[in-house]
Image (spheres, rainbow, N blue to C red):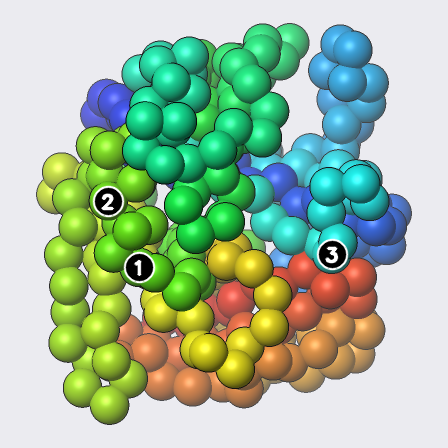
């Protein structure tokens, strides 16, 4: 029997991809990660395509809004004690509100906000208050980590600590510079990377998906029409990773843990 504990604020609980072609995304990610999909009715929002594995849903696909988004992007959902308070705190912490608090049938109360560096993130309340403490290596196909890639890590860190109650720590990675670690109590929850000056695009969140064999998965990325943006590389002794793009331009990282 697995152990569980109270979630509270600051846990990633959902990942949503806004994409120009939902059906193509289903084909691509279903082939690559063996995710399963189903359509869920969400009231005035209509039908919603959720995805998951082993009978547990942990994300969804929506059609890209061309008036708001220029390219496919991932939107993580993070728990807060009170969404309306989180919206209020966003404005006090120099963020911006993209979509105000609203109730989503069968899902909970949500809002979408933007941090001071321009990255979007969703606030969520009303889900299962308990989290399962998984033992052993991560399950292949599960989303196991999130990095924020932005041009002002300290400003972003201050914002997220204020919104989610995270604590910000720094790690010296020598030639690779400083890595900013966001912790939820005794749990490492996310990281922040400095976006290179030459890199194009706005600040954004980068999810990491666990895979069994990184090299095989990268071959499959190309076979299914995706792209490799960062080839397989060592991740500070923890394992190996690669940064990939789906056929519509959505960016996601693959991670193979060490051993």
In primary-sequence order, the first of circles 3 and 2 is 3
Dot 2: within a 10 Å radius of its alpha carbon, few (fewer than 14), some, or many (20 or more) residues? some
Task: Judge from the rendering whether residue 47 lies leftward or rightward of residue 78; answer left or right.
Answer: right
Q: CA separation, marks 3 and 2?
A: 27 Å
Residue located 31% across and 59% down the image: 153
Q: Earlier in the sequence, mark 2 or mark 1?
A: 1
Pick the quarter of the image with the N terminus. top left
The secondary structure type at the circle numbered 3 is loop
Q: Which residue is mark 1?
A: 153
Residues tagged 3 and 1 counted as in contact (Cβ below 8 A):
no
Residue annotated with mark 2? 158
Q: Secondary structure at mark 2?
A: helix
**Quarter assignment of residue 148:** bottom left
Mark 3, residue position:
71
Q: Residue at x 64, y 80 (%)?
A: 228
Q: Residue furthest bottom?
A: 175
Q: Sequence order check: which comes first, mark 3 or mark 1? A: 3
Is any atom of residue 141 visible in this view?
yes
From the image, which quarter does the C terminus lie in? Answer: bottom left
Q: Is residue 235 left or right of residue 256?
A: left
Q: Residue at x 38, y 28 (%)?
A: 90
Pick the front one: 86 or 228: 86
Q: Residue at x 15, y 76 (%)?
A: 172
Spatial CA distance of label 3 from label 1 is: 23 Å
């Amino acid at each position: 029997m697995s152990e569980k504990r109270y979630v509270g604020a600051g846990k990633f609980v959902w990942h949503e991809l806004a994409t120009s072609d939902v059906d193509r995304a289903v084909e691509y990610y279903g082939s690559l990660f063996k995710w399963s999909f189903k359509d869920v009715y969400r009231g005035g929002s209509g039908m919603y395509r959720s995805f998951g594995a082993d009978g547990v849903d942990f994300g969804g696909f929506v059609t890209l809004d061309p008036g708001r988004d220029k390219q496919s992007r991932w939107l993580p959902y993070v728990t807060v004690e009170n969404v309306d308070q989180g919206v209020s705190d966003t404005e006090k912490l120099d963020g911006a509100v993209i979509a105000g608090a609203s109730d989503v049938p069968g899902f909970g109360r949500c809002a979408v906000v933007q941090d001071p560096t321009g990255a979007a993130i969703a606030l969520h309340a009303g889900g299962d208050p308990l989290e399962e403490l998984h033992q052993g290596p991560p399950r292949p196909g599960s989303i196991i980590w999130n990095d924020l890639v932005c041009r002002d890590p300290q400003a972003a860190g201050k914002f997220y600590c204020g919104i989610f109650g995270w604590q910000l720590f720094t790690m010296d990675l020598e030639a690779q510079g400083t890595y900013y670690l966001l912790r939820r109590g005794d749990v490492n929850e996310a990281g922040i990377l400095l976006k290179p000056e030459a890199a194009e695009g706005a600040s954004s969140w980068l999810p990491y998906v666990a895979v069994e064999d990184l090299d095989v998965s990268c071959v499959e990325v190309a076979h299914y029409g995706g792209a490799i943006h960062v080839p397989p590389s060592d991740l500070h002794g923890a394992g190996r990773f690669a940064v990939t793009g789906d056929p519509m331009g959505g960016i996601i990282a693959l991670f193979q843990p060490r051993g």
